[in-house]
Image (cartoon, rainbow, N blue to C red):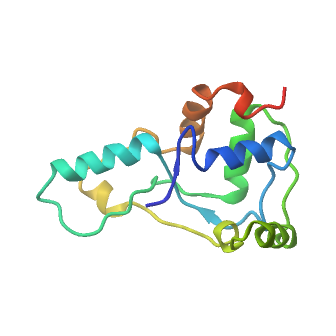
Amino acid sequence: MAITLGDEGVMTPYFNLLKFGLGGRQGSGKQMYSWVHITDTCRMIEWLFNHSEIEGTYNCCSPNPVTNNEFMQTLRKATGYSFGLPAYSWMLKIGAFIIGTETELVLKSRWVIPTKALQAGFTFQYPYLKDALKNIVDKTPRKKYRLF
């Protein structure tokens, strides 16, 4: 399962980065980012449950992964931010050490495609990041992603 985007969870740290002007790319920004909208996660689970004839492993992710740079750029646009300072690898290493985590969570590419699900007939409500983020931002109170 790819990183699931919804109105809470992983979006909270992203919104906090934006608030403080840190909504730029992380590392080189070229690493791939597989994601899925929470609605499509729920829909795929239900779809798999209702199709007992389906067997095997299925990737629960959008059919359109993006680069980290594209993700952050799309998020800034969806929330009305015109810029975001980048976080270089050395900055992420310091931050990861302070909070006790690993930088690979941000710096390693995750490039997954739901080929079997698409071939079996599953359709995504949010196949594109722009639409997924617009949906999330539209139902998120402005105070969660804006300072003022």
* 52 left or right, relative to 78: left
Q: Tell me which residue sits at (85%, 71%) in the image.
A: 94
Above or below: residue 12 compared with residue 146: below
In the rendered image, which quarter is residue 87 located in? Answer: bottom right
* 102 left or right, relative to 55: right
Q: Tell me which residue sits at (85%, 57%) in the image.
A: 86
Above or below: residue 59 compared with residue 84: below
- The residue closer to the viewer here, 47 or 140, is 140
* 3 left or right, relative to 57: right
Q: Position of residue 130 (x, y in %)?
A: 60, 39
Q: Tell me which residue sits at (72%, 71%) in the image.
A: 100
In the rendered image, which quarter is residue 141 located in? Answer: top right
Number of marks present in the image shown:
0
- The residue closer to the viewer here, 90 or 129, is 90
Q: Position of residue 139 (x, y in %)?
A: 57, 26
- The residue closer to the viewer here, 99 or 77, is 99
Q: Tell me which residue sits at (79%, 73%) in the image.
A: 97
Q: Quadrant of the C terminus?
A: top right
Q: Position of residue 19 (x, y in %)?
A: 82, 39
* 148 left or right, relative to 37: right
Q: Note whether residue 123 is visible.
A: no
Q: Note whether residue 49 is visible.
A: yes
Q: Residue furthest left?
A: 53
Q: Position of residue 13 (x, y in %)?
A: 70, 49
Q: Quadrant of the N terminus?
A: bottom left
